[in-house]
Amino acid sequence: MSAPDAPQILGVPIEQLRGRLARDGIEPYRADQIAAWLYARGVWEFERMSDLSSELRARLARSWRSRALELASVERSGDGTVKGLLRATDGARVEAVLIPEDDRTTLCLSTQVGCPLRCSFCATGSLGFTRNLSSAEIVDQVCRMRSLLEGGRSLTNVVFMGMGEPLLNLKAVLDAIRILMHPKGFGFAGRRITVSSVGVVPKFGELLEQARVNLAVSLHATTDALRDELVPINRRFPLAVLFDTLRGLEVVTPRWPVFFEYTLIGGVNDGPEDAARLVRLLRRLPSKLNLIPMNPHPGSPYRAPAPAQVERFLARVSGRGFPVTLRRSRGADIAAACGQLVAGGAQGRRERRAGVGSR
Ligand code: SF4
């Protein structure tokens, strides 16, 4: 049994783990065996790692912890979406969401407890910020949520779009991505991983230099006046700076376009002028556009767009030189849809009824 203050083995990149084991006099290749148990097979108890000697298993169990989160509750939506509420050892709570669709299953991960950026349409932002998640806590969301898959499904995609702004916790996110992509870890291709940011512009280059994954930018507005209101970090990094930076990234190519997320908010950003400005912005670099009709909630000043307005907006931005998708809302009945994560289970639902925002 490890001491409560023993270091976490989860979330340590495998190359680093080799070095740390070597310093303890353990053969470095044992790191690959341990990682295969933890990530590929989902076995976290050292005593079950049967290709390690009993002496080594006992030593590892004394020296390391291998769990970071407990699954506090699980809610399953009528459309197959699964939301997990996960509790850390200090009591902090975050949510992760599994989204099964046809032949793919996407896991949406959280990176912070709460969020400091306070986007005005976001439930998480209304909670304020508690702390960053560790790489162990990010990786353990994958282990825990994967165990909830049913019907022979396996995880195909991972998106960092849950609670928090990933680029404000970049070191832990990069360590987690290294494990997600490592052949002895989860073995995901970089194209299957998407990191979503509202615009922490100085970190874009660092992310894409360190990890060849998809970058998604939550845009939501085409003028600085509106974006300042919806996404306050725009006051520090306005649209011109955002797009100049993206255009300057050599790694952004037609094969690796930037994904833009645009939440359609009824009467706010869903008009013909918005669509025309959006087309002008996105045509200037390799882009993909994902339209997301707003998921409304009690207490929010914003409302969902009318279905006909969504269709008109879609028609105005389609066929303009970049692919466009319209995201169907998933998991809205369990508050797992985009922008609804508040990590509270019953408490969260009470907060929402009392008007504590939504994304
Ligand atoms: S939208 Fe993202 S960055 Fe903005 S407050 Fe919500 S979690 Fe934070």
Image (cartoon, helix red, strand yellow):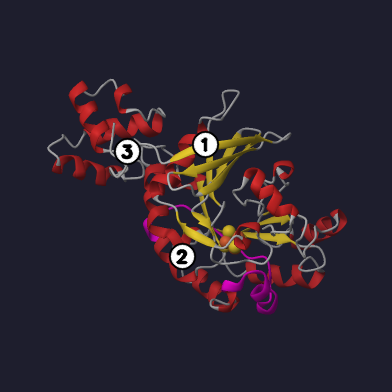
Q: CA distance from mark 2 to mark 3?
A: 32 Å
Instruction: Tell whether label 3 touches label 2 (CB within 8 Å).
Output: no
Q: Residue at x 41, y 37 (%)?
A: 187
With 353 as the anchor, is 81 left or right in this view?
A: left
Tell me residue 185's x, y (percent): 37, 37
The amino acid type, in three-letter code, at marker 2 is: Phe
The residue that mark 2 highlights is: 204
Label whose residue precedes the other's in the sequence (1 or 3): 3
Query: Image quadrant of residue 76?
Result: top right
Tell me residue 354's x, y (percent): 74, 56
Tell me residue 181's x, y (percent): 40, 43
What kind of element bears circle 3?
A: loop
Q: CA distance from mark 2 to mark 1?
A: 32 Å
Q: Which mark is residue 71?
A: 1
What kind of element bears circle 1?
A: strand
Label whose residue precedes the other's in the sequence (2 or 3): 3
**Residue mark closest to the camera, 2 vs 3:** 3
For residue 225: magenta?
Answer: yes
Q: Residue at x 30, y 28 (%)?
A: 46
The amino acid type, in three-letter code, at marker 1 is: Leu
